[in-house]
Amino acid sequence: MASSARVLVVHTPSSKAVIKEFRRVARLTGKSIYRYSESIGIYSLKDGDFVVPGSKRLPDALRYIQQSMHYGIYLLDNIAASLRQPNLGLLRQLSRARAGNDRKVILVGTDLRIPAGLSESVMQFTHQHVLPTRPRLRDGKWIL
């Protein structure tokens, strides 16, 4: 979230785990973190009651993010099939925007292939959900 990049990509096999962690951060810190869903549109992860009207279609949601005057982190998960025009053009504009409030778009998913025209202006991360190991007792010592 502290990255200087405006568009970030999180490659993960478990989008739900990443969304769940962002929801926890939103509730604990009070940060404005939103999620895009094709069935609902843009809605707040902090309190799910706030829904942005007219944001069900991805191009409309990206235009809203681009024109918003407020700070916000916007999670777009499982949109691999939608990474084509006009969405790519809007994402490219968002990634190159330098003025205004600090808005971030985070693409979350498994098969996100970022086209060459956009890949140099986005920051990419890989997330793997690791199950915690239970400590066990061996020779009188607890080990992980």
Image (spheres, rainbow, N blue to C red):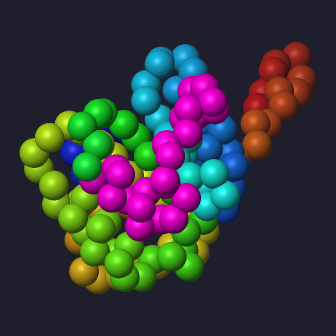
- Res 123 visible: no
**Above or below for 17 versus 21:** below
Relative depth, front residue between 133 and 83: 83
Q: Residue at x 81, y 21 (%)?
A: 142
Horizontally, is 33 left or right of 20 in the view?
A: left
In front here: 135 or 62? 62
Task: Please provide the residue range marked out in magenta.
Answer: 44-66
26 left or right of 125 in image? right
Give the quarter of the figure containing the C terminus.
Answer: top right
Residue at x-position 61% and y-position 44% = 19
Relative vertical location of residue 143 with respect to residue 95 in this rendering, above or below: above
Labels in figure, total: 0
Seen in the image, is 119 located left or right of residue 12?
left
Residue 121's spot in the image, x, y percent? Answer: 23, 65
User: Can residue 46 be seen in this snapshot?
Assistant: yes
Q: Position of residue 129 (x, y in %)?
A: 67, 49
Looking at the image, which residue sits at the far left? Answer: 99
- Tell me which residue sits at (61%, 55%) in the image: 37
Q: Compared with residue 35, is residue 29 higher up or lower down, i.e. above or below?
A: above
- Taking the magenta stretch, the answer to whether it contains residue 46 is yes
The residue located at (82%, 19%) in the rendering is: 141
In the image, residue 49 lies in the stretch drawn in magenta:
yes
In the rendered structure, the answer to whether residue 62 lies left or right of residue 10 reads left
The x and y percentages for residue 134 are 84, 31
The quarter of the picture where the N terminus appears is top left
Quarter-of-image position of residue 3: top left
